[in-house]
Amino acid sequence: MNRLYHFPLSPFCRRVRLSLAEKRIEVELVEERYWEQDADFLRRNPAGKVPILKMGSKTMAESSAICEYIEETYPDRSLMPKDVDARYEVRRLVAWFDDKFYNEVSKKLLGERVFRKLAGTGYPDSANVKSGSRAVKYHLDYMDWLLDQRRWLAGNEMSLADFAAAAHLSCLDYISDVDWNRSELVKNWYATIKSRPAFRSLLADQVPGFLPPAHYANLDF
């Protein structure tokens, strides 16, 4: 049995889960409180991060590397285009969400609203929350601009770029930090990707102490 060590509100874990589910690869989910850094966890990944995917005798870390390994090992239901320029654009946008979006938005909003409480490190820093709330508007506007030119974020086919964005936004949506009325294009894009069978397990996530809003699992918002 394949096994994924994850945390439900980690966007990096969610992207791997979406990739596995889209390709219909069965996996056992093992929730990991990675911030506790226990010895067994650090043996699986000395970097102390999730996700960690165990497939057969292989144990893999780093979400981008995992997703590309899955893509190359299970090429059916492809999430990467064949054209080299199109592949570059997918990788560029995955990096955008994993670096710029994460540091400007996810790290500040999820970090302050959720992970401080889970790790017991005090109350949210209001400056970080305000900064993240401002930044998410910029990113939604950028996504609106992309979707005004393309069917999906990186082109005319759904790709890992869409899963990267959806993974981050779904975590923020769990804590009601996305203004879906800001862009009809982004809202429709998210409704489409949220309706895919691959998304079902994400919509069923429950984190003790944090209840999602009523619209979180509603496919029609």
Image: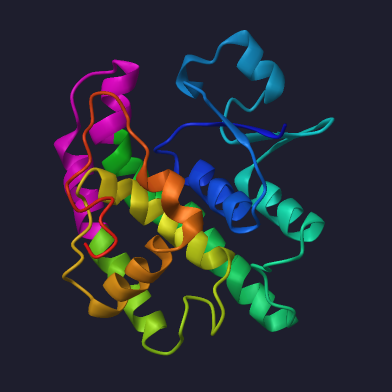
Q: Is residue 33 among the parts visible in the rendering? A: yes
The stretch of residues the image draws in magenta is: 112-135
Q: Is residue 205 above or below residue 132?
A: above
Q: Is residue 147 above or below residue 194?
A: below
Q: Is residue 216 above or below residue 220?
A: above
Query: Which residue is pictured at 27% across the width and 67% down the height?
Result: 138
- On whether residue 169 falls in the magenta region, the answer is no
Q: How many marks?
A: 0
Query: Which residue is pictured at 23% across the width and 75% down the height?
Result: 183
Q: Of 196 and 5, which appears nearest the observer?
A: 196
Q: Coloured how? A: rainbow
Q: Is residue 58 above or below residue 187?
A: above
Find residue 144 and report its horizontal and vertical position in percent: 32, 78
Find residue 127 and report its horizontal and vertical position in percent: 17, 41
Magenta stretch mostly in which secondary structure? helix
Query: Which residue is pictured at 48% across the width and 58% down the height?
Result: 197
Q: Residue furthest bottom?
A: 149
- On whether residue 114 falls in the magenta region, the answer is yes
Find residue 184 and report its horizontal and vertical position in percent: 23, 78
Q: Of 202 and 151, which appears nearest the observer?
A: 202
Q: Is residue 104 among the parts visible in the rendering? A: no
In the rendered structure, the answer to whether residue 137 lies left or right of residue 30 reads left
Query: Which residue is pictured at 27% across the width and 51% down the height?
Result: 173
Find residue 52 and report its horizontal and vertical position in percent: 64, 33
In the rendered structure, the answer to whether residue 194 lies left or right of residue 37 reads left
Q: Of 29 and 95, which appears nearest the observer?
A: 29
| Quadrant where the image shows the C terminus | bottom left
In the rendered structure, the answer to whether residue 59 lies left or right of residue 52 reads right
Q: Residue furthest right?
A: 57
| Quadrant where the image shows the N terminus | top right
